[in-house]
Amino acid sequence: MPDDKLKRREQAKIRNAMKQRESKRLRMAQSIQRELEEVAVKQAELEQEGVVVEKAMRSGNGNLLCPL
């Protein structure tokens, strides 16, 4: 009987460790996903700025610091 208790404890420890690893993996995946979303937003902003700069250059507008 004591061996059964010991086995159950060990199995519980293993299950807990597995849950912790899965939680850590999930947190890391969520963090990476947030970073990817932030990069996508920044990329879109930079692309838009590039469009404005290109239009200003094509029109011959020398004032690229304030392209409106």
Image (cartoon, rainbow, N blue to C red):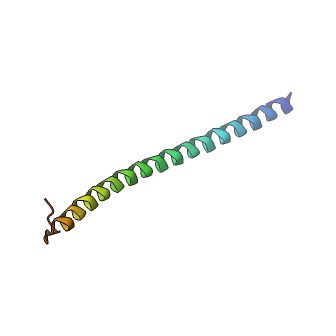
| 60 or 13: nearer the viewer | 60
Whether residue 27 is situated above or below residue 49 in the rendered picture = above
13 vs 44, nearest the viewer: 44
Where does the image place residue 25, in percent across and percent down from the top left?
A: 58, 45
Q: Position of residue 1 (x, y in %)?
A: 86, 27
Relative side of 4 to 44, left or right: right
Q: Residue at x 33, y 53 (%)?
A: 44
Residue 36 lies left or right of residue 15; in this view the side is left
Q: Give left or right: position of 67 versus 50.
A: left
Number of numbered discs visible in the structure rendering: 0
- The picture quadrant where one finds residue 19 is top right
Quick one: which residue is furthest to the bottom in this view? 62
Task: Report the side of 1 relative to 22 (left or right).
Answer: right
The foreground one among 58 and 62 is: 58
| Residue 39 picture location, percent across and down | 39, 54
Image: 54 above or below 13: below
- The residue under the point 43% across, 52% down is 35
Near-viewer residue (54 or 42): 54
User: Residue at image x 48%, y 50%?
Assistant: 32
Residue at (77, 31) in percent of width and height: 8
Q: Quadrant of residue 68?
A: bottom left
Q: Position of residue 28 (x, y in %)?
A: 53, 48
